[in-house]
Image: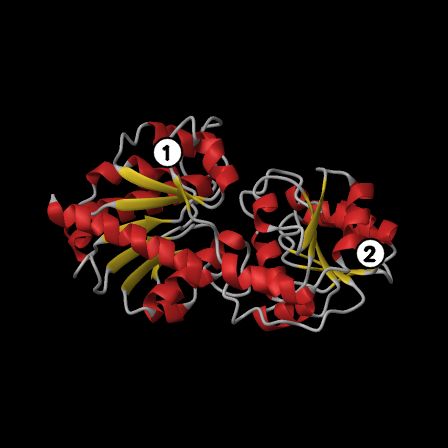
Amino acid sequence: MSARGGALRICLVANSRFPISEPFTGGLESMTWHLAHELVRRGHEVAVFAAPGSDPALGVIELAVDALPDHTGRLDVDAPQSVQVAEHHAYLALMLELARDQGSRFDVLHNNSLHYLPVAMASALPMPMVTTLHTPPLWWLESAVRLDRGASTFAAVSRFTAASWAAITDCSCVPNGVDVTRWPVGPGGDAAVWSGRLVAEKAPHEAIAAARLAGIPIVLAGPVLDEHYFRTCVEPLLGADATYAGHLDHADLAALVGSSAVAVVTPAWDEPYGLVAAEALACGTPVAAFARGGLPEVLTDQCGRLAGPGDVAGLAAAIGEAARLDRARCREHAVTELSLTRMVDRYEALYRSLAHQREAA
């Protein structure tokens, strides 16, 4: 391996909760899948440790996330849920393996999990580790980062996320990127679109309310991960002007987004980045969104409009304004500022810098 220009041996550690496969459960899974494919395309040797059911084309090494039986042994009411214990054991087994002989196989480890153990055990590894911070500080991950003491290098998916971790650790900003070749320009249309996980923190019910106020029909797409929320807060709002298309495969989702007049993004929390907005822009579809978290960094006045957090009336006005924006400029912004190529260029440079430091040590 040449840290300055040759192929790198990269270990990617994914989130163990959901498979790295299409249709993606969320932006974290999409980012990891695209990163792995692009690194392989560039000639690097990549090993991906991910949840069972992940894309076999990645040559995934499955994390052994087997939930413990619920009724064996004495019940401890203070114990964590069995799935949390299973994830702990899966990451512990992986990190112990990498700390032994297997670690010499790699020049760098890129941790895209949300788990504390890879960070907590970084100092035991024979290779440098990059951890991407995909969320604002979570207490269990924050505790590991505070104990890291320089063993890891951290990157955040937006300036907002980097700022939220600033009191805990220094980190560079490497914004998520979209494969603009897989999100082709669409013709636009008469309806709005909302895509993502149908959960309370994404607030699709507010997208329906804003679209109705704006007088435009809306189509929702994505996995239902909170059945109770969907049945009580979203399903009663569906009708002729608000429909649910299901959890679509990539081609169908790209076609839906590209044939929409505007994409509506309604986080009820501080969105770390806002990948669905970047995907929409790649299709030439302008965005109307709540100004929360990293979303304002994704948009410009030429490709989107922002409303205050939770301001449904303001979002309705933003929908009307965004729908009139130039679709060509939306696509141009995605290609030049939000692309997968741009993201992987930055990670590749970071990997090489760390591998070079390792060689020089």
Q: Position of residue 179 (x, y in %)?
A: 49, 65
Query: What residue lies at 59% left-to-right and 38% top-to-bottom?
Result: 270
Query: What residue lies at 85% left-to-right and 52% top-to-bottom?
Result: 214
Say if 257 sits above or below 116 in the image: below
Say if 164 sits above or below 244 in the image: above
Q: Residue type at mark 2?
A: Leu
Tag 2 residue? 238
Comparing 63 with 266, the one in front is: 266
Q: Residue type at mark 1?
A: Asp
Q: Is residue 284 left or right of residue 235?
A: left
Q: Secondary structure at mark 1?
A: loop
Q: Secondary structure at mark 2?
A: loop
Q: Quadrant of the N terminus?
A: bottom left
To which quarter of the image does residue 148 belong?
top left
Q: Position of residue 253 (x, y in %)?
A: 63, 67
Judge whether residue 318 can be spotted in this image.
Answer: yes
Tag 1 residue? 170
To which quarter of the image does residue 240 belong?
bottom right
Q: Position of residue 313 (x, y in %)?
A: 83, 42
Q: Position of residue 130 (x, y in %)?
A: 32, 46
